[in-house]
Image (spheres, grey):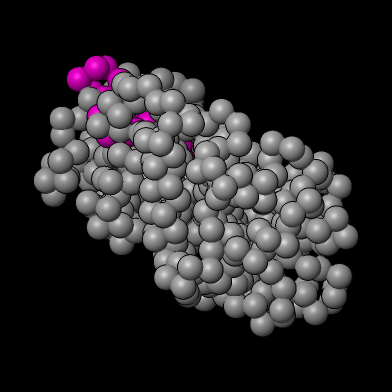
Amino acid sequence: MADALSLNPLPAPKLGEPYLLTPGPLTTAYSVKEAMLRDWGSWDADFRGMTAALTQKLLAIAGDVAGEYACVPMQGSGSFSVEAMLGTFVPRDGKVLVLANGAYGLRAAETLRYLGRAYTLIDKGDYMPPRGTEVAAALVTDPAITHVIAIHCETSSGILNPIGEIAEAVRSAGRKLFIDSMSAFGAVDLDVTRIPYEAMVSSANKCIEGVPGFGFVIARKSALEAAKGNCHSLSLDLHAQWAYMQKSGQWRFTPPTHVVAAFLEALRLHEVEGGVAGRGKRYTRNRDVMVAGMRDLGFETLLDDLWLSPIIVTFFCPADPAFSFTRFYELMKERGFIIYPGKLTVVDSFRVGCIGRMDEHVMRRVVQAAASALTEMGVASGTPPAAALEERAKLAPSNAH
Ligand SMILES: Cc1ncc(COP(=O)(O)O)c(C=O)c1O
């Protein structure tokens, strides 16, 4: 199937370039890289047309049939866009409920602290999901909360948070929702007609499979209009960027022209693959093939299947004392695969990404590489220590939806 997706010729092995089994930057198609071999004048009509096409296509992916939303690209990495979203939309006297279960929720809280905006935190630790009922209760308890921010896929563990029930709790309490869908948008459903939000953020180098250089915020036009003059920052002011783009078709400050060109090619490939559904299907298949193979080697996932995202998966490190993550990483790299360290505080773990220009055939080779790396290390099996499995058992009560 994969090779039928015209994923070949796969430049990575040919050039000796490893596959990036990471959550972005990720492995991109050759044509995406090739699209950067041309220079564009940032004020020129051709480039202005490219910016307009980019925002229209992203709004279509978001399902904005009613034309209620606008898409505002912002230079920089994803965190710049998160900061722009919070700084632009949270009023100076507003208060945000941050739903955290990993590094990116905590980063949103830290961003609000820098911005001097009031916030309160529900911190579920390394990976427990924030539930709709908890959000509803917190909103009843604290009437000062104006906004809620949720992380769609918390990339630090790979958990797919229950965004539907969170959105419903926020909506019925009459508050406004921000979604950090950095690592999920484009592959996991986030249609505004089903999951309404005030603003959503993602970036070029995640599930659309572009290269790094800008993020984008999709926000209600009414929110953008109301945000005039609210932002703390000149360069991160989304209202100003939006207003200038509407007037001139241009970005306010130097745009990442080559990255935009690459992104348009990535969007074309996204559409050819069948949009969000098609992309989500391939990533899900990548995950299923990889997880099944790794389990056959004795490895265990941190999360129960119910919470596994098709984006990235956390595995416990094996109990065998001959296992060393650093050595495993190097052996995987020698075999053409870059994996990712874990971010859990309690037990040792590592992560394997399922996103980027690769398919189930590549994932089978990932499993073969892991098997041969274990053999070379003298590790008999990927079975984790008992403590890791006890840690996982703690998740059990929250497994039921
Ligand atoms: C959910 C989420 N939020 C925010 C970020 C931050 O993005 P960046 O590293 O591009 O600044 C990431 C990065 O992976 C992410 O996965």
User: Relative to 317, does residue 42 appear above or below in the rendering?
Assistant: above
Q: Which residues are magenta?
A: 12-30
Residue under the image location 15 percent in, 41 percent down: 6
Residue 31 appears in which quarter of the rendering? top left
Residue under the image location 65 percent in, 77 percent down: 171
Residue 337, percent from left and from top: 34, 28
356 or 375: nearer the viewer: 356
With 371 as the anchor, is 216 left or right in this view?
Answer: right
Residue 156 appears in which quarter of the rendering? top right
**Residue 209 in sight here:** no
**Residue 39 in sight here:** yes
Residue 39, percent from left and from top: 38, 22
Residue 162, percent from left and from top: 54, 68
User: Relative to 241, does residue 368 appear above or below in the rendering?
Assistant: above
With 110 as the anchor, is 261 left or right in this view?
Answer: left
With 340 as the anchor, is 368 left or right in this view?
Answer: left
User: Relative to 2, does residue 56 appear above or below in the rendering?
Assistant: below
28 or 49: nearer the viewer: 49
Question: Hey, which residue is sitting farthest bottom in the picture?
Answer: 172
Q: Report if residue 25 lies within the magenta region.
A: yes
Q: Magenta segment, principal secondary structure?
A: loop
Residue under the image location 67 percent in, 46 percent down: 240
Q: Report if residue 89 lies within the magenta region.
A: no
400 or 376: nearer the viewer: 400
Residue 328, percent from left and from top: 41, 26
- Count of numbered circles in the view: 0
Residue under the image location 68 percent in, 61 percent down: 225
19 or 54: nearer the viewer: 54
